Amino acid sequence: MTAPAPHQPHPVTPWRAVALVLGGSLVLSATSLTVVLLPQLFGALHREWRTYLDVLGEANLPTWWSSALLVTAALAHGLTGAAGRLARAPGAAGWFVSAGVLTALSVDDHTQLHERSGRIGRALVTYDSFPFYWLLPGVVGGLAVAAALVLLALRVQGATRWLLVTGTAVLLGCALGLELVQGMLMADGHEATAFTLTYHVEELGENIGALLLLAAAATAVSVTRHGSELDVHYTAHRSYL
């Protein structure tokens, strides 16, 4: 009898999972848009469907999805940081900082804490008819988030760096920039189709930004399957000559 062939190493890539998550975000966004713009399709139960599926709502399916995506990204950053520490890579601790930042964003997304900070903005300035006073403290928080993620990007290389930078720009650009646009539309009394499209683009953009940050962590390590075992190596360390 001949000995069984050893298990061949098999690289594990994240892109199928990334595509599935992106598809889920697109489906949720399209479903929400349909519920809001075409209420006649849902008949007498439209209000219940909108409560459960509208991305503007709280404590519903889109909110759970967004929060879960941020939690998953936070876990991925934490695991990548652990791989970096085991590899003794300088700056690997930055992944733990970004994991904490993403965890905080997830908690905020689930609890709508940022909207409750509007009284801080009102204590500083007053604008006629503008509803989103939380944007003032939100900008400060956004700068802190950007600083943590950009500092991490400076310590890594290749695709990981660009995914971090792009993910940060998309996430914060949608969370702050498009919220500002929505506030201006509401202040001018335009809360119809333009407002609806804007907040759907915002929520989808935030999901895409979180997904890019998740992909950044995935590209920072190489994962190889050896039979029932996984071999993980940190590969994103930037070499300084």
Image (cartoon, rainbow, N blue to C red):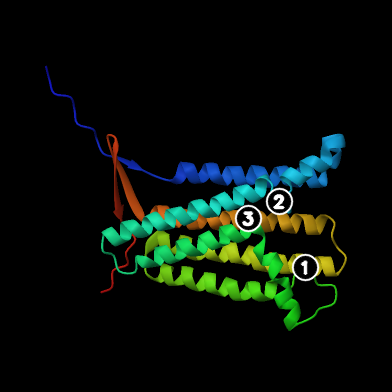
Specify the farthest residue to the top. Answer: 1
Relative to 172, is 136 on the left or the right?
A: right
| Residue picked out by circle 2 | 55
| Residue picked out by circle 1 | 183
Relative to 228, is 32 on the left or the right?
A: right
- Given contact means CB atoms under 8 Å apart, are the residues at marks 3 and 1 in contact? no
Q: Quadrant of the C terminus?
A: bottom left
Residue 198 position, x and y percent, is: 74, 59
Question: In the image shown, does 241 or 62 lie closer to the viewer?
Answer: 62
Instruction: Choose top left, top right, bottom left or bottom right for residue 225.
Output: top left
> Residue visible at 73% across and 74% down?
119
Question: In the image shown, does 37 or 140 lie closer to the viewer?
Answer: 140
Residue 76 position, x and y percent, is: 43, 53
Give the structural element (helix, strand or loop) at label 1: helix
Q: CA distance from mark 3 to mark 2?
A: 12 Å
Labels 2 and 1: the sequence-earlier one: 2
| Residue picked out by circle 3 | 110
Establish if 158 lies above or below 27.
Answer: below
Establish if 136 lies above or below 206.
Answer: below
Give the structural element (helix, strand or loop) at label 2: loop
Labels 3 and 2: the sequence-earlier one: 2
Residue 116 position, x and y percent, is: 70, 67
> Residue visible at 32% across and 42% down?
11
Q: Amino acid at mark 3?
A: His
Q: Amino acid at mark 2?
A: Val
Other residues around mark 2 within 10 Å, as few (<14) / some (14–19) / many (≥20): many
> Residue visible at 85% across and 72% down?
129
| Camera-nearest label, 3 or 2 | 3
Instruction: Choose top left, top right, bottom left or bottom right for residue 173.
Output: bottom right
Other residues around mark 3 within 10 Å, as few (<14) / some (14–19) / many (≥20): some
Other residues around mark 1 within 10 Å, as few (<14) / some (14–19) / many (≥20): many
